[in-house]
Image: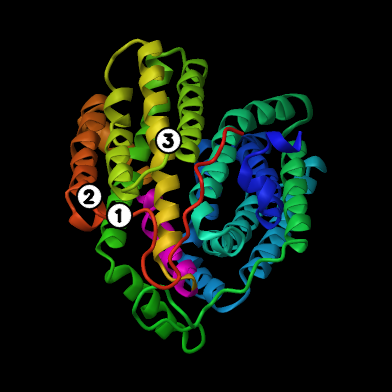
Amino acid sequence: MKSLLPGVLREEPQFARLFVGQSLSVLGDSVSFVAVPFAVLSIGGSASDIGLVAAAGLLPMLLFTLVGGVWADRFPRRRIMLVSDVVRFATQGMTAALLLTGVAEVSHLVVLMVVFGTADAFFMPASTGLIPQVVPPGRLREANALRGFVQSSGRVLGPALAGGLVALAGPGAALALDALTFAGSAAFLTRLRPRETPRETPREPGPVTTRGSFLRELREGWEQVRTRTWVWSGMAAMAVYHVVVLPSVYVLGPALAEHEWGGAAGWSVVVAAFGIGSIVGDVCAYRLRIARPMAVAAAALAVASCQAVIIGSGGSLALIAGLEAVTGVAVALFFVLWDTALQTHVPESALSRVSSYDHLLSAGLMPLGLALAGPVSDSLGLRPTLYSMTIVAVPAALALLCVPAVRHLPAHASGPGAARTVPAPSLP
């Protein structure tokens, strides 16, 4: 059985521990994504209350992600992730207990989601920065592809598991399971022994420190972004994707499905097809040798940015699901290659700070697009809005492909500390 595992899991025991723990956490997140809205409804909440609870979890991303990036470059990343897991275990456990005992109120869920979102904001930059500490440079792409594979699989399996739990035992039971997954993740983190980061020896020229004033460290992180054209242009393109394209999936797609595809059943077919496509994309990212990863990533982002026009195309449900599967492949390729490029070419001593800017300018800005999508579609119409989203997003991705620093970025770092090459991975 051991020989059937991917090479990076067999040969890198520290990564294997991290991988198993994070796999549990991803499954729990997928369950929570479905369970929380039904939890709000189960205590008499409205659609507006669902939005309020969701916003409570997202707002800390805007407030604390940059703080989390500085802390993750200053203190041990494993410790930050461990504390975050413990906090999220406690908040989800309290939410489950309130629901199961019948005393939960919307205000309780809002407060607990704020705490949960704050822990999330510290976890994400630390997680990105920890990967190079548990795998050698030449295996970063494999590691990121396997992480992406778990996330994609969770998007397919998690909602099905959550639906069954909510139907049989209620949303409180589903969130109790989510809490247990964070406990499991924390248990694996306690056994993790990452190598220490060479924080005084950046791989590329430029001053990087880890001690000093918060604002100075934040500026140093921004310098690592500003002085790398491929990084800031990639972040700009991703911001467009999150603000313009993803609202077509989270807001306008379900609204169109309600009228034309048989409601939730039809939409679930589209979502599942996208999830299957993303699994295929992660497998491709794992297997393929790519000499110019950011060039491929930019082309993949252009394909991914077609989701709005696909959803609004008026085609059959089967055609739309098939095309969404193609965009799923592209989305998975983009994020694996993007994360690997950051971990390869950004100094480890500044990686979490750079990652925090990445999260702030992408996921952190997404609520803006979610809030505007409905009113704009009410004004312009559903399909014209979807077409307009594509007209904005695809050229932004193609503009990224036109940047020379993006097209020519190599797969491996050069100079001192350059990544060593490893044989192409065998099939899992």
Say what amino acid the circle numbered 3 marks.
Tyr
> What range of the chain is rendered magenta?
349-368
Spatial separation of the CA atoms under disc 3 and disc 1: 23 Å
Residue bearing the label numbered 1: 234
Question: Which mark is drawn over residue 250?
Answer: 3
Name which quarter of the figure residue 322 lies in. top left
Say what amino acid the circle numbered 2 marks.
Leu
Tell me which secondary structure the magenta stretch mostly adopts: helix
Name the one closer to the observer, 154 or 59: 154
Q: Kindly check if marks 2 and 1 are in contact, taking CB atoms under 8 A apart as contact.
A: yes
Task: Please report the residue visible at 50 percent of the width from the left and 40 percent of the height from the top.
Answer: 286
Name the one closer to the observer, 7 or 124: 7
Q: Is residue 400 visible?
A: yes
Question: Local crowd at mark 2 within 10 Å, few (<14), some, or many (≥20)?
Answer: many
Question: Local crowd at mark 1 within 10 Å, few (<14), some, or many (≥20)?
Answer: many
Estimate the x, y position of residue 176 in percent, counting from the top left.
77, 43
Q: Quadrant of the C terminus?
A: top right
In the image, taking residue 397 as reference, residue 62 lies left or right, namely right
Estimate the x, y position of residue 85 in percent, counting from the top left.
69, 58
Q: Report if residue 428 lies within the magenta region.
A: no
The residue sitting at the bottom extreme is 212
Q: Is residue 94 visible?
A: no
Residue bearing the label numbered 2: 400
Q: Report if residue 359 lies within the magenta region.
A: yes
Estimate the x, y position of residue 276 in percent, counting from the top left.
50, 26
**Which one is closest to the eye, mark 3 or mark 1?**
1
Task: Please report the residue visible at 38 percent of the width from the left and 27 percent of the height from the top.
Answer: 253
| Total marks in image | 3
Q: Secondary structure at mark 1?
A: helix
Q: Earlier in the sequence, mark 3 or mark 1?
A: 1
Spatial separation of the CA atoms under disc 2 and disc 3: 25 Å
